[in-house]
Image: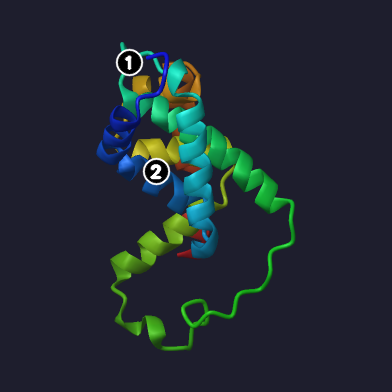
Amino acid sequence: MNQPDTIQFTNLIEANKGILYSVCNNYCKDPSKRDDLAQEILIQLWKSMGNWDAKFPFSTWMYRVALNVAISYYRKEKNQLAPVSLDEQDIQVAGDNDNWTEKEEKLHQLQLLISQLKSLDKALMLLYLDGKSYQEIGMILGITQTNVATKISRIKEHLKQSFSKIA
């Protein structure tokens, strides 16, 4: 695909919008900045659409571009001082979480631990939890299948140890 075709681009993005949502939600916790990140990803996808080789799944290429943009965005944001948010949803009063099930609480804790991982590790877990194969993860991140398996095993062990400390 040499010149981006607006209709084809729109259809591909629509069919794979879950990737965009997933990457944005995992790399940008501030809802007011998620739209900015999504827009940055879409702009980069449009600009580099000519680089997509249609012999390979669009979703794999889209993940790679989206993760690269998100990681850059995350690093840039991390280097800036974050303002303290006083939104109602961020302020938790004792007893507010009483209605959470134990499973929801553990899932929330796991998500917090994953959000604290290094960028590549977070990307690996995002793809792994999305059900991508090791081969697909390797293609998206540009690493070998063996490296993917090793890293995921180490990340799981790290998460298990971290989780046992807080549980």
Mark 2 crowd level (few <14, some 14–19, many ≥20, 10 Å Cα): many
Q: According to the image, label 2 marks what residue? A: 20
Mark 1, residues whose alpha carbon is within 10 Å: few (<14), some, or many (≥20)? few
Residue type at mark 2? Leu
Give the image location of residue 88, x and y in percent.
Answer: 49, 83
Q: Which residue is rendered at x = 37% and y = 25% of the image?
A: 60
For residue 18, what is the image quadrant?
top left
Residue 137 position in % (x across, y down): 40, 26
Q: Position of residue 44 (x, y in %)?
A: 52, 33
On the question of residue 159 being in view, the answer is: no
Q: Say whether residue 15 is left or right of residue 90.
A: left
Q: Farthest residue to the top: give it.
A: 55
Image position of 79 (left or right of 161): right
The way the protein has been coloured in the rendering is rainbow
Q: Is residue 21 positioned above or below 49 on the image?
A: below
Question: Which residue is drawn at the image coordinates 66% and 52% (left, top)?
Answer: 77
Q: Is residue 18 visible?
A: yes
Query: Which quarter shows the N terminus?
Result: top left
Q: Residue at x 49, y 46 (%)?
A: 39
The residue tagged 1 is 56
99 is higher (above) or lower (below) than 29: below
- In the displayed structure image, the side of residue 124 where residue 106 appears, left or right: left
Q: Of the residues shown, which amino acid type is indicated by label 1?
A: Phe
- Mark 1 secondary-structure assignment: loop
Q: Earlier in the sequence, mark 1 or mark 2?
A: 2
